[in-house]
Amino acid sequence: MNIPMLNLKRQYDYMKKDIDDAISKCLNHQQWIMGPEVYDFEKNCSEFLGIKHCIGCSSGTEAIVLALRAIAISQGKEFFSKDDLIITTPFTFTATGDAILRSGATPVFVDIELNSFNIAPEKIKKYLENDKKKRVCGIVVVHLYGIPCNMDEICKLASEHGVFIIEDVAQAFGGKWKEKKLGTIGNAGAFSFFPSKNLGCFGDGGMVSTSDDKIAEIVRILIKHGGKDKYNVDFLGYNARLDTIQAAVLLARMKFVDEFNNRRKSIAKRYNNFLSEIKEIKTPEIKEGSVFHQYTIRVPEEKRDTLQKFLKEKGISTMVYYPVCLHEMKLFNNRAIFENLSSAERVSRQVISLPIDPLMTEQEQDYVIANIKEFFQKNYGV
Ligand SMILES: Cc1ncc(COP(=O)(O)O)c(C=O)c1O
């Protein structure tokens, strides 16, 4: 059997009629830049998420940069400066950290919680309390693997210290913290529609969500070069619009997003039922608002790579998200602040993500489970 991490072709076949019709409409109207689908999609997202503004843009990375720049501009500066510190997690995709650098600010990496993989509120608290010069201006949280961060604690800290929150929701479209959709809790949310995401398009795409009129207005300006008038510009902006054709694909796929998120969750529960029997595996917690962008387990670090190799030989793809923490990358050398990040470092050596295609059959799931069991029984007699 051959089991990829995701089977995008199978997903396309499942929604083929909706997607083909949506693309065909674009072919007929030919409004490729800011066509009607972009505005329809933004409106749909606003309703779905329960937030006033959603602004499509060219990628999830740009969404974080746009949100940060909009906050800087709303505070009267075009970019942040190196003296402006933004707290974030070192255990994420590079884009979270490089977007902070691109906004002009300095990232401060604080450690994560071993169990949720997300930034640890008590570490944020500690840093904020020691920040006597009040250099920290914001926090970028990441709902990694679709698992919500503890937003009650983080919002409390942000309001006590007067700092903003941006949610990196790249991996968590449709996820929730209590009654609220992720991306609607901080000052702004940054979404990615990269093809493999819970809501993905057929190329790059992203979106900023916010309830703040000023931030929304500035993001709209920044995505088209930095001026209300494209030919008379105020700020250093970007060409970062969401393509009409991507918006059309997203509109069609959005009809399936709750169904697909529920399917992911059922697969995660099923994996957990069987894999939690193996004492060397630490299975993820099934939190209420999780949308399982990834199903990620922790295994003893000396066994992780051999497990991955064993599964590959059986035709099962797996991925390590992420083998290198941000503070260990050359990019962040002398550009970031951090102290002890031992949990993030440890987790980066232990994690392995299993296939979690929403349309995976039970037979395919069983094959993955059986092979993981076989690996531990055969090699370690567990
Ligand atoms: C946590 C996180 N942040 C940001 C991004 C960047 O999104 P994009 O690839 O759309 O630029 C990604 C996507 O890969 C991500 O996983």
Image: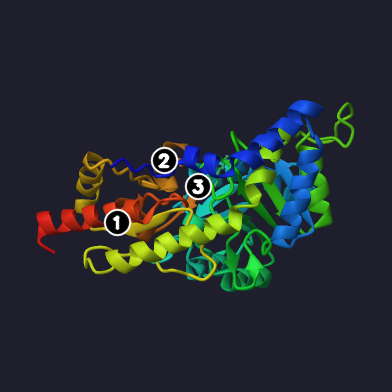
Separation (CA) of disc 2 from disc 3: 10 Å
Residue 45: image location, x then y, percent: 72, 53
Q: Which residue is mark 2?
A: 329
Judge depth for marks 1 and 3 and give the one in front. 1
Q: Amino acid at mark 3?
A: Ala
Q: Mark 2 or mark 3: name the one nearer the start of the chain.
A: 2
Specify few, some or many for label 1: CA neighbours under 10 Å numbering under 14, 14-19, or 20 or more. some
Quadrant where the N terminus is found in the figure: top left
Judge depth for marks 2 and 3 and give the one in front. 2
Q: Which residue is mark 3?
A: 336
Task: Using residue 187 as the reference point, say whether residue 113 is left or right of it.
Answer: left
Residue 183: image location, x then y, percent: 65, 58
Q: Amino acid at mark 2?
A: Met
Q: Quadrant of ligand 1?
A: top right
* Secondary structure state at the residue bearing disc 1: helix
Task: Using residue 153 as the reference point, say whether residue 18 is left or right of it.
Answer: right
Judge depth for marks 2 and 1 and give the one in front. 1
Q: Which residue reaches farthest front?
A: 17
Q: Amino acid at mark 1?
A: Asp
Q: Residue at x 66, y 73 (%)?
A: 160
Q: Which mark is residue 366?
A: 1
**Any atom of ligand 1 within 8 Å of the CB at mark 3?**
no
Q: Residue at x 60, y 73 (%)?
A: 178
**Any atom of ligand 1 within 8 Å of the CB at mark 2?**
no
